[in-house]
Amino acid sequence: MEQIRLFLKEEDGVGVVEVILILVVLIALVAIFKTKITALVNKIFQTINTNAGKI
C-alpha cells in the first residue's frame, strides 16, 4: 500500500511535459520567424566572410 502512495506522489513526469511544451513553443517561434532568422544568419556569415579577409 505504501508503494502505491509513493508512486502516486512521484512527479518526475511533470518535468518531461514541461520540456516538451517548451520545445513546441520554440519550434513554433522558429517556424513563424523563419525568414527573419535566415536573413539574420546570412548577414552574420556575410560579415564574417568580409572581415576575415582583413585579418
Image: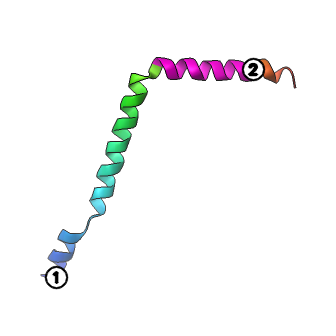
- Which residue carries the number 1 mark? 2
Residue labelled with disc 2: 49
Indicate the position of residue 13 as horizontal and vertical percent values.
28, 59
Lower position in the chain sequence, tag 2 or tag 1 = 1
Quadrant assignment, res 4:
bottom left
Q: Secondary structure at mark 1?
A: helix
Magenta stretch?
A: 35-49
Give the image quarter of residue 44. top right
Residue at 17 percent of width and 69 percent of height = 8
- Mark 2 is on which residue type? Asn
Q: Badge 1 local density, few (<14 within 10 Å), some, or many (20+)?
A: few
For image coordinates 79% across by 21% down, the residue present is 51
Q: Nearer the viewer, residue 38 or 3?
A: 38
- 51 to the left or right of 9: right
Up/down of 26 relative to 3, above or below: above
Identity of the residue furthest to the bottom in this view = 2
Vertical position of residue 49 compared to residue 20: above or below: above
